[in-house]
């Protein structure tokens, strides 16, 4: 754009210097560049609000005009057919909280971009309508989720985040000290520490905890021998804060929603270590995750469902995973599911004018099917299309749509390792995880985490390989079978 501005400026200057009223190649070029610049800026102004409305990372409130109800109530008057996503995903969480007076601990999961945080916000609103005091915290503010997390780290983060959220609810003066100050005192009285630790301030503790700096590793090792005392300290602090919240809000029930733990994933080489750390937290340390006097809901990665029976029994209710939207019928063949396609088209229509952007609804339908019913992928498709349209055309063309789909498909194909082809082909053919071997669970978790394997609800849960790579996987598996069957040359 700057280059165009420069050329237009130089051409215009040259025309003025010659003082000619006659249309010359130079001032004609200047006019064309100026028109192109004006057209580009008008297109940018037109597209920008659509692009912003398609942010894949923005949780929305149910009062937002972009919110689409994708779940069903029971009974004949259900707003949406149950085949889209099953029943209301937050209803079991809400019911478990209301049924347990003393407190509860539950897990909620979903693929990034399926609307998990949006549904968690709806849970918050529903609880508040029923007279609960609800605290919400985002794990990303307190820990680098690209690295494994220990129970010691999580307990400190939980207490610190609990106190920070309480400040927003009842005011900064609610207790004598926040947990960060209290934790520094705990370190200096309960743990043998180095002189460098004694000099730490609150900001230092937060920074080294979030960044996983070497000094924190030393502290974590020391805390490993004081886990029971650390847990007692955290529980004492939470209990004190809960009492203050009840007193100031007159709410008998306090609920803590701890979001974004599902973003724990690690870099490729460290993914298994991160996966094992979250599984260890949820199994071996489940009792430590219950906070006294309140209800807690943690969001966790979708690959945790691979350990569903082992993990779910430790919590109040089974693990709930928010599935993708069903846009294809179950089975190895690609057969559209019209209600799901219509629901995703509704999502799109609340963000941009479909006629202006697509013209032909068939193009939008193809884009929706290619997304696999995964909202984040669809939003990414739309953002790429809109960005390309600034210098392209509106409505977009079939070539524009194919280019975006093919680009994403290539990235997805490149993410599949040779050792993963047969695993993915088994899921493609069976639509279940029944035949997955124990040795392949780590690889499967990676594919679930990167949306290459999607979960759906249609009366029962089932799984599909993402449509972007389904044909590729079938062809590669057949090719590998032929190669294995061919006689080996001596």
Image (cartoon, rainbow, N blue to C red):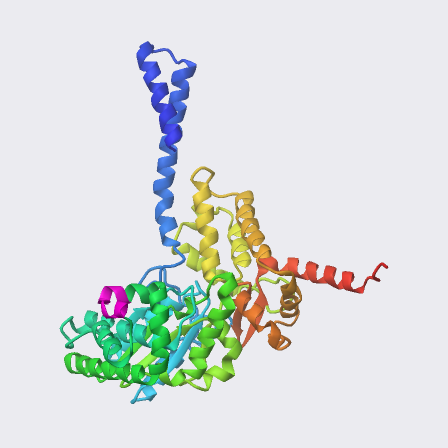
Q: Is residue 170 left or right of residue 280?
A: left
Whether residue 200 appears in magenta in the rendering, the answer is yes
Q: Is residue 9 above or below residue 427?
A: above
Magenta region includes residue 204: yes
Note whether 25 is above or below 96 in the view shown.
above
Q: Quadrant of residue 166?
A: bottom left
Q: Which residues are magenta?
A: 195-205
**Residue 123 appearing in the image:** no
Nearer-the-camera pick, 148 or 193? 193
Quadrant showing the C terminus: bottom right
Which quadrant of the structure image shows residue 331? Answer: bottom right
Nearer-the-camera pick, 219 or 237: 219
Q: Could you tell me which residue is drawn at 40 percent across and 68 percent down?
A: 116
In percent of width and height, residue 43 lies at 38, 39
Magenta part, dominant SS: helix
Residue most extreme to the front: 195
Q: x, y percentage for residue 450? A: 51, 62
Q: Residue 347, position in %: x, y?
A: 42, 59
Horizontally, residue 65 falls left or right of residue 271, namely left
Q: Is residue 172 visible?
A: yes
């Amino acid at each position: 754009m700057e280059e165009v501005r420069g050329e237009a400026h130089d051409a215009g200057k040259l025309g003025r210097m010659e003082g000619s009223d006659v249309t010359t190649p130079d001032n004609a070029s200047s006019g064309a560049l100026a028109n192109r610049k004006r057209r580009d800026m008008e297109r940018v102004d037109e597209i920008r609000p659509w692009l912003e409305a398609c942010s894949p990372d923005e949780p929305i409130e149910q009062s937002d005009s972009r919110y689409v109800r994708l779940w069903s109530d029971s009974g004949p008057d259900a707003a949406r057919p149950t085949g889209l996503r099953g029943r209301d995903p937050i209803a079991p969480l809400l019911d478990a909280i209301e049924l347990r007076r003393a407190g509860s601990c539950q897990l909620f999961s979903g693929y990034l971009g399926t609307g998990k945080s949006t549904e968690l916000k709806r849970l918050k609103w529903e609880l508040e309508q029923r007279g609960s005091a609800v605290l919400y915290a985002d794990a990303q503010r307190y820990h680098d989720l690209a690295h494994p997390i220990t129970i010691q780290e999580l307990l400190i983060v939980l207490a610190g985040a609990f106190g920070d959220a309480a400040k927003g609810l009842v005011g900064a003066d609610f207790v004598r000290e926040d947990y960060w100050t209290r934790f520094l005192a705990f370190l200096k009285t309960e743990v043998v520490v180095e002189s460098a630790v004694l000099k730490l301030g609150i900001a230092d503790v937060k920074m080294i905890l979030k960044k996983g700096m070497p000094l924190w590793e030393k502290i974590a090792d020391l805390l490993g021998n004081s886990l029971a005392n650390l847990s007692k300290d955290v529980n004492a602090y939470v209990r004190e804060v809960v009492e203050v919240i009840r007193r100031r809000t007159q709410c008998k029930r306090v609920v803590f929603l701890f979001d974004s733990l599902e973003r724990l994933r690690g870099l490729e080489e460290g993914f298994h270590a991160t996966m094992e750390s979250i599984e260890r937290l949820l199994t071996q340390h489940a009792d430590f995750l219950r906070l006294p006097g309140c209800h807690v809901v943690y969001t966790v990665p979708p690959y945790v469902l691979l350990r569903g029976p082992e993990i779910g029994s430790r919590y109040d209710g089974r693990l709930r995973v928010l599935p993708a939207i069903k846009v294809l019928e179950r089975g190895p063949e690609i057969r559209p599911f019209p209600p799901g396609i219509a629901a995703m088209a509704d999502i799109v229509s609340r963000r941009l004018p479909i006629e202006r952007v697509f013209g032909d609804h068939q193009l939008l339908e193809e884009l929706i099917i290619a997304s696999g019913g995964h909202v984040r992928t669809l939003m990414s498709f739309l953002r790429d299309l809109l960005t390309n349209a600034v210098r392209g055309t509106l409505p977009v063309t079939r070539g524009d749509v194919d280019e975006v789909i093919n680009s994403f498909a290539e990235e997805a194909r490149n993410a599949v390792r040779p050792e993963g082809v047969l695993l993915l082909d088994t899921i493609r053919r069976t639509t279940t995880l029944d035949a997955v071997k124990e040795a392949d669970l780590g690889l499967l978790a990676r594919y679930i985490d990167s949306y290459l394997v999607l979960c759906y609800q249609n009366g029962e849960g089932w799984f599909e390989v993402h449509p972007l790579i389904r044909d590729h996987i079938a062809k590669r598996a057949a090719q590998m079978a032929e190669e294995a069957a061919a006689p080996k040359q001596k």
